[in-house]
Amino acid sequence: MIPATAFNLLRYALPEVIVAVTGLAALTVDLAFTQGRRNSVRWAAAGLTACAGCVAAILVLLLRPLPGALADGMLVVTPLTQMVQVVLVAFTILVALLAVNSDFTHHIGEYLGVILFATAGMMVLVSTQNLLVIFASLELLSLSLYILTAFDKRSPRSSEAALKYFLFGGMAASFFLFGISLLYGLSGSIELGEVAAAVTSHPITPLLAVAMVMIVTGFGFKVAAAPFHLWTPDAYQGGPTPSAGLVASSSKIASFFVFAIVMALGLSAEAGALHPSTATWTPLLVIVATLSLVIGNLAALAQTSFRRLLAYSAIGHAGYMLLGILANNANGLRALVYYVITYALATLGAFGVLAALEKEGVDQIRDLAGLARRAPFLSFCLLVFLLSLAGIPPLSGFFGKFYVFSAAYFADSGLLWLVCLAIAMSVVSLYYYLRVLKQVYVRDSEGEPIATPLLTRIVVGFMALLVVAFGCFPGLLLNWIGSALATIPH
Amino acid sequence: MNHFPWLSALTLVPIAGACLALLAGKRRGAARAIAAASALGSLAITIYLWSAFNTASGAMQFEELHAWIPALGVQYHLAIDGLGLLMVVLSAIVVLISIASSWSREEHGGLYFAMVLFLQAGLFGTFTALNFIHWFFFWELSLIPAFLLIRLWGGAARARAANQFFIYTMVGSIALLLAFLALYLATGRFDFLDLAQLSQQGQLVPALAQNLHWGGLSGSSIAECIFWAAFAGFAVKVPILPLHTWLPSAYAEAPSGTTILLTGAMSKMGLYGLLRVLVPIFPQQMQHWLTLLLWLAVASIVWSALVAWIQTDIKRMFAYSSINHLGYCTLGIFVVLKLAGDQINRAAAMNGVFLQMFNHALTASLLFWFVAMLEKRSGGLHGLNDFGGLRKVVPVLCGTMGIAVFSSLGLPGLNGFPGEFLIFKGVFPLVPWAAAVSLLGLLFTAVFFLVFLERVFYGPVNQRWAAMPDLSLGERLALLPAIGLMFVLGLYPQLIVGAMNSTVMKILSQVRF
Amino acid sequence: MLAWTIYISFIGAAILMLRPKASARTARVVALVASVATLALVIIATIRFTPGELLTITKVPWIPSLGIEYHLAVDGISLVVLLLTGIVGVAGVLFSWNVEKRAAEFFAFYLVLIGAVYGVFLSFDLFLFFVFYELAIIPKYFLIAIWGSTRREYAAMKLALYSFAGSAMVLIGIIATLVETGGKTLNLVELARYPFPLHFEMWVFPLVFVGFAILAGMWPFHTWAPTGHVAAPTAASMLLAGVIMKLGAYGCLRVAMMLFPAGMGAWSFHVLGLSSWRNLFAVLALIGIVYGASVALVQRDFKFVIGYSSVSHMGFVLLGLMTLTQTGLGGAVVQMFSHAVIASLLFAVVGRMVYDRTHTRFLNELAPMRLAHAIPFAAFTFVIAAMASIGLPGFSGFIAEFEIIIGTWQAWPVLAVLAAVGILIGIGFTWRAMDKAFFGGGATAEPQPAAPHAALPPITIPEKIGALILIASTVVVGVYPRLLLDLILPALNSPLFDGLRKGAWR
């Protein structure tokens, strides 16, 4: 335990600080220097600031001494958290770059600022093992996301989505807080290791069960798992494209990571270590996973809006990822992190394509008709993203599924039926992804070729490249996750 | 066996010729020349084989034996005895006649001649192969060109005729295939000679009983099932009543050149099968059913002669006459299995069969050649009543055709006589009733041929054909060797009987056990 | 060297993908060069191959944490299917010579598909195998959905979902295998030696077998095949029937049967007279043979006739596999080759030579056209293909079906007889289709004047070359089946198939 002096705090929390300060900087740059200029100039200036800050944060992250734990687990820095934080910041850069060419708002500085605050919240979220800090950072993240969702003031849908998101989010947060208080009541601590020691030392009590349900409800909302998913389609459809991308990608990574950490370290394990035995919360997560798989994938079949389809597919994917948590061991965590990162890449990529098509007003699937003739490059990238989501090799989505499924089955052969269900549902999912691709490639349209900004194409192309590369060479990502995981005791 | 592979060469010559003819395509003259050259080449090889053949031995000669599909015990096994020799010679002659008859038919292009040559390859292969798979390959190979020849160049009702022909022979082939499959499964052999040897040693039925379990049937019942399946395959090809119904329409609708092939050579495939396969492998079964078999043969003879009588179409009439003549052959073959009989009589019958096979090939081919000439001169007509009084208009044609008709009728001095005579000489002492009933067939044959002569050659001249040209010099020259051969064989049947004698003895020895 | 078959195909595809605006001419030349090069590689490798060996081409770690390797190797059986892929691949390009619509994309998808198929046939790591296997699904979908005809989108989706459902079952099997072996290896050679517990094989075998058999057109999971074949453009029909269905059959043999032979052992109980998965699948295969042939007998669409005939002929492959005799298995592999060549030839005639000229596939509309006179080469080719298809001796189909029937006889005589009935029905439908389509059989109308079909464009040179390649393949194998059997049988006798031999080998 490192003493929680101000210096140490700054030393270990420097990346988060940098990101938060960058948020303020972007705001300042926009308000103070480029006010009144053309939007493109303002986006460029603020975006450059944000990206520079993020790059700096990544550098600092990589240079930060490891591992470290401060103030009763309020700040726990391990190679694993470092890795996830790097990924989160990288995603923020991608989202910012995608946002730069949009024109849904004049409040450019504010928009980028809030994105960076959300990022800061996520960074804290993943590097803590203290329930209260988790709650606080979760709220920072959530509030930022509500704002981001509501940012398109010209669109009533945006406001409606944000309102729904906010109402459900608020309720979920209160459930989560209630769950934490019950845990505190049971264990007398809000530090994960101590909670675990207390709750696993004796058989499960009704109160503990209630606490678990509350906690799972809170996280279930964040990761868009059924039956806590009702906000998702609206937020995906109504929010500005970059916001929806952020909700769908890095917010997912952070939430799933902390979900896994809490379930594994806080509710099932010997103090502070990953424990391979079946946890008491398994039935609970099995129910949530089953519902997510079935509802997400089946409801996606009926969608006519591309974004709502992505939303339901996200719910389905939450089901797959819950299998990684259910494995409840290092292997499962590794599979989960791989899955969620590659999933986030593919989803953000799909939103990136949508962002590039913003001017075309694409919402319905049929609006994509003939896209392959009008924008061959974007169409090809979309093909890569959607097929990765469907789990077609050699794209990363396939390996993610393979790894998560085998990890879950490895850990507990009783999960075989759930694995089978998940695989069956992935067959269903291919149908709706192909429906989209059918419009893109098969149908004809008379539309003119679509001009897309070079930057967007580079960003989307880069993500497509990563999706392919991580699929063909899963080792690139797995080794990184693996070496980071190796430092966690188990 | 380090001699030149004459038998492979014999099969390859027509295949090569066919490929060249295909390449010649629409250049009819070239295709025709290639076909003729190929057919002459084949004939030359067969004549060489005849001269090099050791007539003193009934054993297989010119043998070629190579592994082909070892996993299934399939070998590339070619050899001929007297029977095979006779067959390849007659095939070569028949194909030559067929090509000659199509010489000036404009509609017969490169594809036609290619098909004829492919069919010839099938014939040669069938008559030389001794391993079932290998043999079956050629058996079927002859089927496709025959079908196409009828289907593409036949008369008005060709579709039906071709389909009927194909379906009948195909069903027969499948029956054969299944029969040999069963034999293979029981014995692990495909080779005719091996199977015959097993049968001679009395091991076939026990092997069937041991390795096949068909709902508790005994070994001998299984053997009988297999025998009948194989019999059906051959009987369709010959044909033997009641499997003959495809034949008249096929013969009538096929272009005459093809009919020559069908009747001259392909019908012999069936007889060859009876002699090469059924008699050596299933002698007991044949004996068991001998009475029925004899009735079938007799029925073929009498019934077809009767039906020929009432035909109004020359080709149909000759078609039924073919069934009739082949009936004598089957009768002669079946009679050989009459064990109680005298060896000399059986030998006589068998010799008669050999002669009759060759003679029927020659005579029937010639008859249809003449039909082809009539068709050519009349623009394709071949009805019995379409002509009349031709004797006055085209005396040479009628004279030569008359020779062929009388040969077919069995006039002594011509080739038709010695064969039928020998068969009856053998059959009478062995199965008098069969011979007696068959004589009726002989009688009816005389009647319907006379009807033919009366309607076509005699009577008032049909003015339509008053200007019909007689045989050209080329036709006369082409006919000359064939007619000559008829006389030669009529007067000196020993030419064939002498060469076949040891083979006949071997076949007879196979049914003595 | 063989690995380059995969790379060349993918490189060709990449070139075309990067230049989607390339002219049709460029596109087909690229495709032709790539496919001919791969075929040449396969032929050279076959000539150099020593029968019976297992030739490792590449073996490098890929995902070490799960014991997954990039492991390419060939044995005799792989070579046979590689050969058929190469032959059909080249012929497919030749028969797509007239594709003008989005030609670069067409050939790009085509080459991806070919490359993936090569990958499957070369893979000796289960995971890698599966990766290539699934990779083949997507190009199929687009080839049909974009360039297809009758109900193309429906057929393409059906095909994609059936394939994916099948591979989902396989995926479960692979994950189970991975877990069962402790996640150390997915190397097929190792797995073939691994002593799986009996109860494990008993449930994994049927799962994986059915998963693959869906793609092989096993009744009752065959329904994708006729619709898919009919809707697909000619080259895709050729690949579907010729190669993709073989993927399934190859998977059945290489994965399901080779790794989990004990799964074919007897159950401890009887259901409807069936006492093992092997019995059940043999009966399903037989139903496929007879059902496919019977349905083909009553089709009015020429292509549907061929589509159902594929179901019937693939039934022979599965039946041969289930015999577990050397003869039956050998016959099944030969039948894979044979059906690939013959079916692609049939589809080439129907789809390219006939449909692209007459714009109808209905037998009743084709009958009055007397195509035998209008396009004699097509008629000639189809007659040859039909003869090969019904299994006349001298063509590859004969020796294959013959061996399968012998093998079946040794296992279940009754099924052998019924399969022979299937062959008879096969003769019937082939006959009917040929007669109606080319010779005007059953046409009520008199032959139309020469004008309409005089207008039919003549058969082009690429079509002729393609047809001759395929005809030559079936004839060569038919006349000299040892070309393939000498590759197949030593492979079946190699240690890889020890499990099968120990089980029920006769």
Image (cartoon, coloured by chain):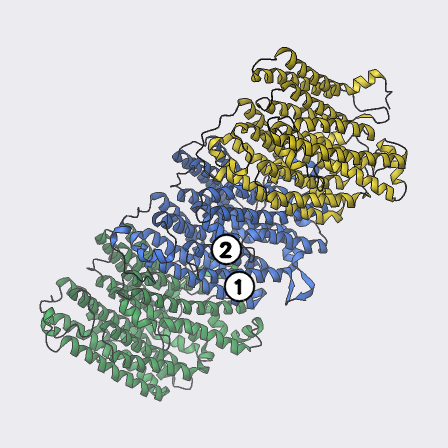
Chain colours: A yellow, B green, C blue
Is B386 situated left or right of B110 in this image? left
Q: Which mark is residue B238?
A: none
Residue B476 sits above or below residue B489 on the image? above
Residue type at mark 1?
Answer: Ile
Observer-nearest residue: A219 or A62?
A219
What is the x, y in percent for residue B182?
51, 69
Is B240 situated left or right of A27 in this image? left
Residue type at mark 2?
Answer: Gln
Is C423 situated left or right of C207 in this image? left
Q: Residue C198, located in which quarter of the rendered image? A: bottom right
Chain to which the residue tagged by mark 2 belongs: C
Residue A354 sits above or below residue C192 on the image? above
Per the image, the residue denoted by label 1 is: C406
Q: What is the crowding at mark 1: few (fewer than 14 residues within 10 Å), some, or many (at least 20)? A: many
Per the image, the residue denoted by label 2 is: C335
Observer-nearest residue: A26 or A397?
A26
